[in-house]
Amino acid sequence: MAFNLPLNNGSGVAIVDVPGGTLATNENFTTLYDYANQNSPELVKELYYTNGKGKLTGFLGAVGQKKTYAADTVQHMEIGRLHNKLRAVTFLGNVFTSPTPHNLRVGMVVEMADALGVKKQATVSAITSTTVFTALNNGTGAYGLTSPVNIVADFSNTFKPGADPFDKGRIWNPSARINYTHILGETYEASNSKMTQKTWLQTSSGAVKWANEEIERTSMLFDNLHENTHIFFTRLTDASAAAAAGFAQGMKGIIQQIEQYGNVANDYINTKADLDVLTYRMKQQNTGCREYTMHANHDQLVRLQQICATQNASFVNGTHWGTFSNDKDMALKLDFKSIYLNGITIHFSSLDILDEPTMYGDTNYAGSGVNYILLPSGKTDIMRDGNTVSTPYISIYHRKLEGEDRERKVQIFGIAGTPQKGDKTSVHFLSETTNEIAGANAFFVGNKGAARYA
């Protein structure tokens, strides 16, 4: 056999001497994570990390489509429900007061019901203000209702022959959904003598790249901050002390937008009855979506497995849902990846950041932490610039302006980059980003606390 000197060493890493004239610069810098993604991850020798590498990312890449933006905000319009319903309307005699604008017109027939189940119909006879109106009973005598009542406003109407219909038409004003730009940054700094500890790597394209383990750790931390910000960040309020001190207000995180426009739940999902309530709400929202993914912590996943496992019970009064496929040589599989219930498919997925002990797995989050985020799958329609467009339910934006892409900008100063006075090298990570939630009413967030959401 002819002499053979492989490019790779015994560990499988491509080892290349620094070619003459090649310097470690911004252009040929890489992270071990990026290198592994683009080449052969199974061949990369890694250090032993006592508690794992700490990388918590993956959620955004799985659920969000990448897009770019140029302005300081990302905005689209959404139109609410077709029919109008009034809640908690108080009344005295024939005069009704709504806590929100009623949008009624004289001649409309409304149907109202109280908490005791009494139901009546009435005709609107006068409009006093945007929240006060008069309605006359369509039946005989008094209403017999207990205040307050809920009113189906777009129920019907009635006019005499030859009479003019309404003098004002109905207008459906779309509501703006706005999110704001957010600049994230992180810095690594070390003496130039420490920066000599580089690893040179041969990429599959033949290009030579260099990496540094400590810069790699900072890079991972930056990626985690990016992920955490998109999910959990709450935009600084206008009147906050931090905003008054001049700090940037930032974006609205995914959970903040769900809490503002979507569905919130207390405590864990523990029974099939809980899932029935959940799927019923999905249908009530009438978004047309019938497939969801739940990104949950460990405790919620355990509860879901227990729910699924007990549905094929052989004990007395147990519910039997058919046989599960099995054979004598198959190991026992206790996990369920998805369920199909009441016409809705829900897939289960672990969200590591919810269990990380230095993050939301901390004991102090036992009563206030998130236990799952439930997201719709596919796309929905929104209005943008006056046009109806189809878009993913979640989009992750990174700013791109005048040729500069600020998705993940890495700048190196010192021996490996732009010269600086001190005997040190600095690496700066920057990302300008935001996200867009379309149809937040199709999203759900669950909290560990039994009464977090009133």
Image (cartoon, rainbow, N blue to C red):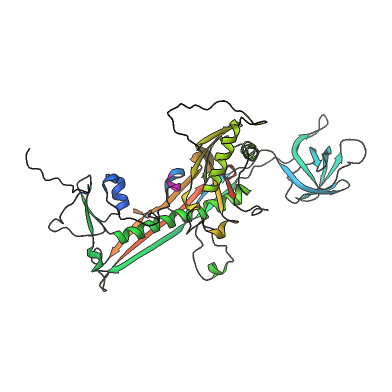
Q: Residue furthest right?
A: 141
Residue 125's image quarter?
Answer: top right
Q: Give the number of callouts.
A: 0
For residue 45, side relative to residue 326 (left or right): left
Quadrant showing the N terminus: top left
Residue 282 lies, in percent from the top left, at 61, 38
Residue 148 lies, in percent from the top left, at 81, 48
Magenta stretch, main secondary structure, is loop
Q: Closest to the observer: 402 or 239?
A: 239
Residue 333 lies, in percent from the top left, at 48, 35
Observer able to see residue 162: yes
Residue 149 lies, in percent from the top left, at 80, 45
Q: Closest to the observer: 96 or 10?
A: 10
Q: Residue furthest left?
A: 2
Residue 55 lies in the magenta-colored region? yes
Residue located 89% across and 35% down the image: 139
Location of residue 213 with respect to 333 vertically, above or below: below
For residue 283, side relative to residue 88 (left or right): left
Location of residue 402 with respect to 241 vertically, above or below: above
Residue located 28% across and 54% down the image: 30
Residue located 49% across and 58% down the image: 359
Observer able to see residue 386: no
The magenta stretch is 53-61
For residue 104, side relative to residue 363 (left or right): right
Residue 423 lies in the magenta-colored region? no
Q: Closest to the observer: 154 or 312?
A: 312
Location of residue 12 with respect to 425 vertically, above or below: above
